[in-house]
Image (tube, grey):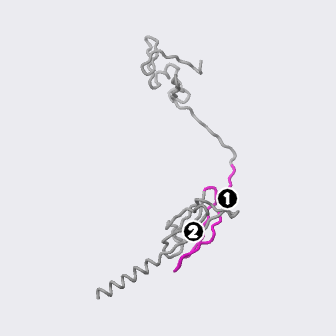
């Protein structure tokens, strides 16, 4: 009795191992050029849950291994291309998926603005520059008040002296003058 149960479990495990299939396919653009490193996702058809994923190789080919039987959506996408969904059914054999043709998605920009802000403190070879224009404490403050609040700067109002990180010989320039 135990041996027949063991044989039955063994046969079922072999059957279950053979119920896993492979999906081979290729992804190209509309000019029949392979798309390298495109994302290929196998999604469950009922709830779009991710089952497997792969990337296309240099020739645009991909392979999804150990896929169970069922109804799926094959999703192909790449940045700069429109996403494609293809329904597929896997039942009893490996599948060669239909060619995924991705269409370029061109979007023209009306205007591009590049903005940059200088850091509050810049270190050059022989000088330290405090860019007060980027400091929030500069609003409504005098130049001396801004210097007092700058890191590493000490203002002595009694002796009219300014020191920077312990050095007394400090030259203050406003706009390079």
What is the quadrant of the C terminus in the image? top right
Secondary element under disc 2, as helix, strand or loop, is strand
Labelled pair 1, 2 in contact (Cβ < 8 Å): no
- Mark 1, residue position: 104
Boundaries of the magenta span = 79-108
Up-down: is 37 above or below 126?
below
Up-down: is 154 above or below 83?
above
Residue 154 belongs to the span the image colors magenta: no
How far across and how far down the image is residue 82, in percent? 64, 60
Question: How packed is label 2: few (under 14 Cα within 10 Å), some, or many (20 or more)?
Answer: many
How far across and how far down the image is residue 163, in percent? 45, 18
Q: Main secondary structure of the magenta part?
A: loop
**Which residue lies at the image location 52% right of the left edge and 64% below the top edge?**
53
Up-down: is 161 above or below 122?
above
Secondary element under disc 1, as helix, strand or loop, is loop
Residue 85 belongs to the span the image colors magenta: yes
What is the total number of numbered labels drawn onto the structure image?
2
How far across and how far down the image is residue 57, in percent? 58, 62
Farthest residue to the top: give it.
Answer: 159
């Amino acid at each position: 009795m135990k041996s027949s149960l063991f044989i039955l479990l063994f046969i079922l495990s072999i059957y279950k191992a053979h119920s896993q299939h492979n999906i081979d396919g290729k992804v190209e653009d509309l000019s029949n050029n392979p798309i390298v490193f495109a994302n290929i996702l196998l999604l469950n058809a009922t709830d779009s849950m991710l089952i497997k994923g792969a990337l296309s190789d240099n020739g645009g080919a991909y392979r999804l291994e150990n896929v169970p039987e069922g109804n799926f959506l094959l999703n192909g996408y790449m940045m700069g291309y429109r996403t494609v969904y293809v329904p597929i059914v896997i039942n009893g054999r490996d599948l060669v998926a239909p060619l995924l043709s991705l269409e370029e998605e061109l979007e023209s920009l009306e205007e591009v603005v590049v903005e940059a802000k200088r850091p509050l403190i810049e270190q050059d070879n022989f000088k330290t520059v405090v860019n007060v224009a980027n400091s929030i404490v500069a609003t409504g403050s005098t130049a001396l008040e801004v210097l007092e609040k700058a890191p590493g700067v000490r203002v002595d109002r009694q002796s009219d002296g300014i020191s920077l990180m312990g050095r007394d010989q400090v030259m203050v320039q406003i706009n390079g003058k």
